[in-house]
Amino acid sequence: MKHLSDIGEDELIRRLVALVPTGKSAEGPGDDCAVMDKGGERLELLKTDALVEGVHFLKDAEARAVGWKAVARVISDFAAMGGVAEHFLVTVALPGSMEVCWIENFYRGMGDCMKAHGGVLAGGETCRVPEGSAAVISVAATGSVERGKAVLRSGGKVGDEIWVTGKLGGSLAGKHLSFTPRVEEAKWLVEHFKPTAMMDLSDGLAKDLGRMALASGCGFKLETELLPLTDGCSVAAALGDGEDFELLLAAPVGMDVAGWLERFPHLELTRIGVLVEQGEGDDLAGGWDHFA
């Protein structure tokens, strides 16, 4: 009998999605957000995410920072689609022994992120887990993107250059609790760079680049010597640490970065490779897998 650890997260998702109706949407399961087409000038975006104590944050982590992360992760996914988050639903499953001040500060952190990057709390649920169990926080959100400007993982073409914002690696040193979702940067890229494919880096470049290339029906060639490394980090950390929450994108050759440097002078935009024919190029190992 196979176990989840035998097949890994991506294969599990593939199997589960095949077991249920997925409806008729502009884009169903498999991207950073689901895209729903209900007519009008904007497409609706849907997203859900979860944080588990001991997996996404440690018990002694500062509660306000964990709250920021819970919302910023979701906003990052909306940004990676070229859209914005609008309404949040938050479910918290907590042990009765949790201190009230911890969860209050957690909500303050969520509020900090919403005020900074958009969206409001629309509802949620509270429930209890058995004593000794990990706290679980689920954040769902709705949002939108202008029709014709949604960027999927699946639009990349052979010959497109691969780019990444910011620096990679080092999330385990604390960056995963204090990152800034690239909302304005994604909006600028969609308007000026016109990426063919885009996603945010949550599970590490080694994992996520392969996902984007596969969704686009391509392979990839990565130039590791070009990777923008966080100070003190190695190439291995940049490939595998995960939770960078930078933007990974593909775009046609010849994009002019001068406008980017003028608009975002303190944030790097780095070309790191190219999409190639499927079955060719590199095959990277590593990155985060919940069940590996």
Image: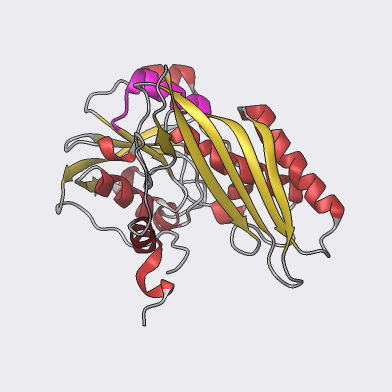
Q: Residue furthest bottom?
A: 1
Quarter of the figure that contains the C terminus: bottom left
Residue 183 place in picture, x, y as percent? 52, 29
Looking at the rendering, which quadrant does residue 119 occupy?
top right
The N terminus: image quadrant: bottom left
Instruction: Tell me where residue 11 appears, x and y as whole percent.
Output: 34, 63
Q: Is residue 21 above or below residue 190?
A: below
- Magenta includes 198? no
Q: Position of residue 267 (x, y in %)?
A: 49, 30
190 in magenta: yes
In this view of the protein, which residue sits in the foreground, 70 or 168? 70
Image location (x, y in percent) of residue 24: 34, 38
Dominant secondary structure, magenta? helix
Query: Which residue sits at x=34%, y=34%?
Result: 26
Range shown magenta: 183-196
* Above or below, comparing residue 245 to residue 268 in the picture: below
Q: Residue at x 51, y 38 (%)?
A: 76
Classify residue 27 as left or right of residue 46.
Answer: left
**Residue under the point 37% across and 28% down:** 150
Instruction: In this rendered view, identify the residue nearer to me: 183 or 205.
Output: 183
* Residue 277 located left or right of residue 79: left
Camera sees residue 266 = no
Quarter-of-image position of residue 270: top left
